[in-house]
Amino acid sequence: MALKKLLATAIVTATMTTAGIANAADTRVGLVVKALGIGFFEAAAEGAQEAAKELGDVEVIYTGPTTTTAEGQIEVINSLIAQKVDAIAVSANDQDALVPILKKAQQRGIKVMSWDSGVAPDGRQVHLNPSSNALIGEMNIKLASDAVKATGSDSGEIAILSATPTATNQNIWIEEMKKVLPNYAGLTLVDTVYGDDLADKSYREAVALMKNHPNLKAIVAPTTVGILAAAQAVQDEGKIGQVYVTGLGLPSELAGHVDSGAIKSFAIWNPIDLGYSATMISYNLVKGNASDSEVGMGRMGTAKLDADGSAAMAEPFIYDASNVHKFAEIF
Ligand code: RAM
């Protein structure tokens, strides 16, 4: 009996100590993603953990809804406010819908930034783009043009398979794609559809694109979830060589589809560096180490902020059969 009690006390003490260590983190950052279970965000979380380890006194709370909705993110953010985190860094499912809850967070002294997919300036202090939006848009159309050429033709129909209709980042990239499209005389954009960054919906939308547009030559998916689902759909529909998939994706998820021939080339930036940088910026905001024009990102250098507090990281990188397997080991 006495031993049991002793053991029970020991367990309680151990638990308290663990809790004590967790609470000892001087700075707690809530890293809110569009939805849980997306490889791109898991890679970003890996970078966030790297930053936390480097800083030493930071705890990252990786969280997000189960589907890509603003409502789900509002719930998650409410809970982070209740937990009195020091900073919230969010990839937004809707740039406007999150503003009221993020204003509430800011009123309570929580530093707020967006990364990847932005929040309107009213709801956050800083926004970190992975790269220049114009460059991402242009790169996607260039990749689409290369994909059409891979079918053996100089001209042809292309379609966009996006994430949600309210995703800030994809909507800006689509706008940028449309701006440069007139420079590619052979390309005709016949459709834009939304898979909501859900694997099954993206797959169904890709199948429907091929059914509705029998002459389609390329599907451009500026989303890691969409591009993977579309490549699978092309393979399952027996359209390899006839329809090429391109856009933004992870080498680790797409290497097999480059091997199968459903994808010739695609692009992405380093998601680990993105999550790392978002965490470093959050930390510096909390510590008051940011000016109106710049904020540090640790090993990634300094983010230069424009008038509305946005910054952009490096150029995306292109992957194909020559390098995809090498990078598949990293992200
Ligand atoms: C998906 C998400 C994310 C986007 C990438 C390219 O993982 O939509 O926001 O940046 O694709």
Image (tube, grey):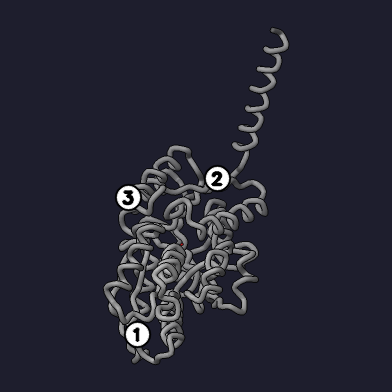
Residue 183 appears in the picture as rendered? no
Sooner in the amino-acid sequence: mark 2 or mark 1: 2
Indicate the amino acid at tag 1.
Leu
The crowd level at tag 1 (other Cα within 10 Å; few <14, some 14-19, many 20+) is some
Q: Residue 19's x, y, as percent?
A: 61, 32
Q: Residue 271's x, y, as percent?
A: 55, 63
Residue 290, numbered circle? none
Residue visible at 51% across and 58% down in the picture: 39
Q: Residue furthest front?
A: 238
Q: From the image, which quarter does the N terminus lie in?
A: top right
Residue pointed to by mark 1: 181
Mark 1, secondary structure of its residue: helix
Sooner in the amino-acid sequence: mark 2 or mark 3: 2
Q: Residue 81's x, y, as percent?
A: 43, 42
Which one is nearer the viewer's eye here, 308 or 146? 146
* Whole-number angstrom distance, CA of label 2 to CA of label 3: 22 Å
Which one is nearer the viewer's eye here, 305 or 212? 212
Which one is nearer the viewer's eye here, 67 or 110? 67
Residue visible at 46% across and 50% down in the picture: 36
- Mark 2 in CB contact with mark 1 (< 8 angstroms): no
Residue 28, numbered circle? 2
Indicate the amino acid at tag 2.
Arg
Whether label 1 lies within 8 Å of ligand 1 gets the answer: no
Residue pointed to by mark 3: 100
Mark 3, secondary structure of its residue: helix
Indicate the amino acid at tag 3.
Pro
